[in-house]
Image (cartoon, rainbow, N blue to C red):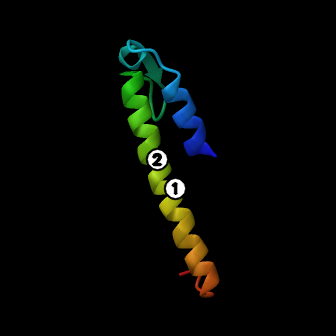
């Protein structure tokens, strides 16, 4: 679901919007462009999906707490 939502947002960006500046507040406020925020979010999605897959595998083999 999160991947789908990011794709929909990116598809809706105009040509100039990825260069727009915004404040990214984690872990402290810093100015970034929208393109950076999208790259960062995609990176996070990949890692969280890997974590979910690992947890699912551990659950199936009965080794969730290792």
Q: Given contact means CB atoms under 8 Å apart, are the residues at marks 2 and 1 in contact?
A: yes
Q: Secondary structure at mark 1?
A: helix
Q: Nearer the viewer, residue 11 or 6?
A: 11
Q: Is residue 18 above or below residue 2?
A: above
Disc number at residue 11? none
Disc number at residue 44? 2
User: Is residue 28 visible from the viewing direction of this image?
Assistant: yes
How many neighbours does mark 2 have within 10 angstroms: few (below 14), some (14-19), or many (20 or more)?
few
Q: Report the side of 53 relative to 34 (left or right).
A: right
Q: Report the side of 52 relative to 10 (left or right).
A: right
Instruction: Give the residue number, with chain letter if any, for mark 1.
Output: 48
User: Is residue 65 visible from the viewing direction of this image?
Assistant: no
Q: Residue at x 39, y 36 (%)?
A: 39
Q: Secondary structure at mark 2?
A: helix
Residue 34 rendering spot, x and y as whole percentages: 42, 23
Q: Nearer the viewer, residue 37 or 28?
A: 37
Q: Residue at x 57, y 71 (%)?
A: 55
What is the C-alpha distance between the residues marked 2 and 1? Answer: 6 Å
Q: Give the quadrant of residue 64.
A: bottom right
Q: Residue at x 38, y 12 (%)?
A: 16
Q: Nearer the viewer, residue 12 or 50?
A: 12
Q: Residue at x 48, y 19 (%)?
A: 13
Q: Report the side of 19 relative to 55 (left or right).
A: left
Q: Is residue 43 above or below residue 10?
A: below
How many neighbours does mark 1 have within 10 angstroms: few (below 14), some (14-19), or many (20 or more)?
few
Residue 4 rendering spot, x and y as whole percentages: 58, 41
Q: Report the side of 37 relative to 66 (left or right).
A: left
Q: Is residue 58 above or below residue 42?
A: below
Residue 61 rendering spot, x and y as whole percentages: 59, 87
Q: Is residue 10 above or below residue 61?
A: above
């Amino acid at each position: 679901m999160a991947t789908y939502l990011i794709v929909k947002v990116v598809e809706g960006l105009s040509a100039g919007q990825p260069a727009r500046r915004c404040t990214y507040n984690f872990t402290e406020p810093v100015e970034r462009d929208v393109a950076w925020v999208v790259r960062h979010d995609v990176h996070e999605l990949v890692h969280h999906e890997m974590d979910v897959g690992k947890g699912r595998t551990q659950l199936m083999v009965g080794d969730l707490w290792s």
